Image (tube, rainbow, N blue to C red):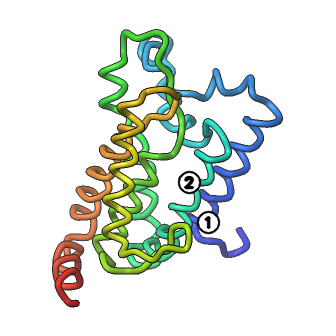
Amino acid sequence: MLGLQASTLILISTILVSLFVLYVRPSLIAKLVLHPYSVRRENRWYTLITSGFIHADLWHLAFNMLSLYFFAGRLEMVIGTENFLIIYFASMVISDLPTLYKQRDNYNYRSLGASGAVSAIIYSSILFNPLGTIYIYFIPMPAVVFGVLFIIYGYYMEKRGMDYINHSAHNWGAVSGVVLTLLLVPYSWDVFIQRLFSW
């Protein structure tokens, strides 16, 4: 499709689906959101994926998609489209599994967002370029520092527990991203160590 990378297509489709659900058909949220109580009881396993394409609000969407934009394209070029897609979608599911188990009997719990998958891509990318510079609010920082702040943000918001965003998925997505990258691209650890201490 127009020669676009898979990461670009994911970015575009997530933005379009999120905006459509937020502003055109908000009633779809109930069908697409991850509701652990209903997953096994109503066979709604598909929501482990669909919940990753919808977001709570514009800020939630912007934060995840900007993070994906900074890291995804280059990572896909380095590890290949197949590996990228495996890491992204496998981590989307894996990062939700702890929440699925923990909240399985909580009828009132729901979550949404691509946080787990995005976190996986961030940490996979950091393995290949830990000292790469990105800008957050015009402040330059090494990618590895951004990765740490991303986790802290997720931990803080998880403790607040005041929204439908599955913030614990940040941490589990990070673990999934690193582990899958090491399995799929074994030399990535050597690259990480070499570049981390090259400065």
Q: Nearer the viewer, residue 150 or 30?
A: 150
Dividing the picture into quarters, in which one does residue 137 lie? bottom right
Q: Quadrant of the C terminus?
A: bottom left
Q: Dot 1 surroundings within 10 Å: few (below 14), some, or many (20 or more)?
A: some
On screen, residue 30 versus residue 170, left or right, reads: right
On screen, residue 55 versus residue 129, left or right, reads: right
Residue, x 74% and y 23% (percent of image)? 27
Residue, x 46% and y 46% (percent of image)? 115
Query: How far across and down, in percent of the image, does residue 141 sit?
Result: 40, 74
For numbered disc 1, what is the local secondary structure?
helix
Which amino acid does the dot numbered 1 rest on?
A: Thr
Q: Is residue 116 above or below residue 163?
A: below
Query: How far across and down, in percent of the image, does residue 37 sit?
Result: 44, 13
Which amino acid does the dot numbered 2 rest on?
A: Phe
Dividing the picture into quarters, in which one does residue 80 lie? bottom left
Which label sits in the foreground, 2 or 1? 2
How many numbered tags mark residues here? Answer: 2
For numbered disc 2, what is the local secondary structure?
helix
Between the C-alphas of marks 2 and 1, the distance is 16 Å
Dividing the picture into quarters, in which one does residue 26 lie? top right
Q: Is residue 89 above or below residue 113?
A: below
Instruction: Tell me the tag on residue 73.
Output: none
Q: Is residue 163 above or below residue 198?
A: above
Residue, x 66% and y 27% (percent of image)? 29
Q: Dot 2 surroundings within 10 Å: few (below 14), some, or many (20 or more)?
A: few
Residue topped by disc 1: 8
Q: Earlier in the sequence, mark 2 or mark 1?
A: 1
Q: Is residue 1 above or below residue 31?
A: below
Q: Quadrant of the N terminus?
A: bottom right
Query: How far across and down, in percent of the image, does residue 181 sit?
Result: 28, 63
Residue topped by disc 2: 63
On screen, residue 112 versus residue 182, left or right, reads: right
